[in-house]
Amino acid sequence: MNSQFLSWFPLFSILVILEISVFVRIPLCSSNPDMFYETCGTAFSCGSISGIGYPFRGNGSPEYCGYPGLVLYCNQDNITTIEIVGMAYRVLDIDQTTQIMRIAREDLMESRCPQVLVNTTLDYTLFDYASTNYMNVTFIFGCPVSIPGPSSLTCGSNGYSSVYLLPGAQGPGSCNVSVVVPAPLVQADLGGTLNTTNLDQIVQEGFQVKWKVDGKACSDCTASSGRCGYNFSTNQSTCYCSEPPYLSNTCLATATGPSGSSACPSFHLFLLAILSIFMNFPTSLSADDMRYTNCTQEFVCGRITRIKYPFWGLNRADYCGQPGFELECQDNVPLITVMSEKYIVLEINLQLQSLILARQDLWNDTCPAHFVNTTIDFTLFTNAFGVRNLTLYYGCTFSIGPIPGFLNASDCNINNTDINAFYITRNLPIDPRLGRCNSTVIVPIFERTAQALDANRTTLGLAIDGGFGLQWDASDECSMCLASGGECGHNRTENRFTCFCNDQPRRKTCSDRPDSFLASLAANLPFGNKYGSFMRQFINTNCRESGILDPYSSLGASALRAIE
């Protein structure tokens, strides 16, 4: 009988502590983390742009402080820029009241002609043109003969001697490239000819766009003394508060009892009682999970250092990164395989989610053993802006003289056979003679490198070895996981993101220590025991409205799932 009493004594002791804490209201929840509120309190300021808050964020702020795609950058000259569909724009003005921003293409701020030969394109899920007082202007490059009618101007860049201007959005036609740029409507006359006088200054005045993010949720949040942010779990704007509930629609709600103190009993007293009673409490609370420990390690190879998710390889297990992002290290040279082709990794920028690669088979040698085009896995990567294709031709049986832009490369000896080699750095008009070459290899290079190659300021080998840029779109959940103390990873069984915490993996974020404790406690209580049921009900009713078990908070989600 004594042993039976002792077996029930621990639970009886807990019930006594819980009952006392209910009536005495020992404070607890004031120590909940307000990390989101604190980290999202800095407005963006750079040069003439100042005091900018949500939905924008600075590139140094956590991702959850701004709406996806609305990241502002401040360069060394205190100039604010934003990237839209891979193009850099200079931010000239932001009016958060009207949600209108005036921007201009960065490549046109120092030149009369576009330096990046791609059209101006908005992300229409985020922006619309804010005014109808603009029209499209098309720059036409590389025309084979003089075109009568359109205005022309000399750019002195991109390797083209003259550029034509046409009103509206036009294709290149028989010319090499066309670039569409918005310009003030007054620049076109009734005859369809554009006045090029002071065109560079006028284009640099930019154009207005209106962002589509609903501002009411943020207004309600700030009116309640909260700070606006983005919840990647719900894909909606949210409100960060300095007191419980820390994550909500507004910060007006409180979690205090009748006496004004927190509704949760003293966690320290509660924790002391539980730890002193349950000697067989799960050891996972104190021992770091092996996967968490492994994913804290960084990939280091040569000059590529401090690399983590979504990459893995070498000392990082495959669950520490996404499929397709494995890195190798051979002779202190970092490599990645894309579509069965190996590339040398020249640079990785985890913040910008970009990398620079160079073909391993063409490194220091423009004569590959196999003629394979550069093929990108577009389920994983996208081309960075400012990239141009260079085409290598091998074994051609015609004279190159009549084909403009067709240039000599070093001849190759492949499989003991001497073959000639040529290259071009831009699209040529269709010429049937090009079909008389045995093989072609297409290699992307940076636009600035292509321009230098066209102007004989660099060599073909150095241009190819300079590589090309790619971008990836990794899970937005990673920043939330890192902010909660976890390490980002991938669940290969379910093919989804996972967050490795020091005790166990979780779907999105790690719970804080009180939350983990309550979740583990609730999960290990005996379902069939009436005392266990009482404790579950106690935690549920007394702590649900606090910051610890806020159902809208990622930190409280795991505990609530355990007790429901």
Image: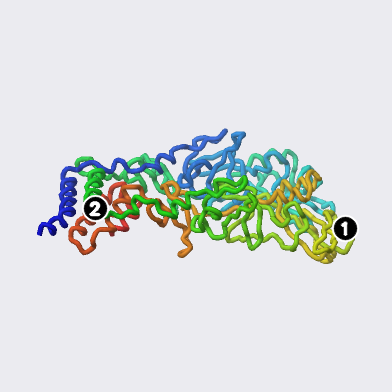
Q: Amino acid at mark 1?
A: Ile
Asked if residue 491 shows in the view, the reply is yes
Residue 481 appears at what percent x and percent y? 44, 50
Identify the secondary structure beneath mark 1.
loop
Identify which residue, 93 or 353, lies in the foreground: 353
Q: Residue at x 88, y 62 (%)?
A: 398
Residue 273 appears at what percent x and percent y? 22, 47
Q: Residues within 10 Å of mark 2 (few under 14, many from 20)?
A: few
Residue 327 picture quarter: bottom right
Identify which residue, 557 or 552, lies in the foreground: 557
Q: Residue at x 50, y 42 (%)?
A: 57
Q: What residue is disc 2 on? A: 278
Q: What residue is disc 1 on? A: 400
CA gap between label 1 and label 2 equals 85 Å
Q: Residue at x 47, y 49 (%)?
A: 296
Q: Is residue 475 left or right of residue 519?
A: right
Identify which residue, 383 or 396, lies in the foreground: 396
Q: Residue at x 39, y 51 (%)?
A: 288
Mark sitting earlier along the chain (1/2): 2
Residue 297 higher or lower than 375, as above or below = above
Residue 360 appears at what percent x and percent y? 69, 55
Identify which residue, 49 or 446, lies in the foreground: 446
Split into 4 quadrants, where in the image is the C terminus?
bottom left
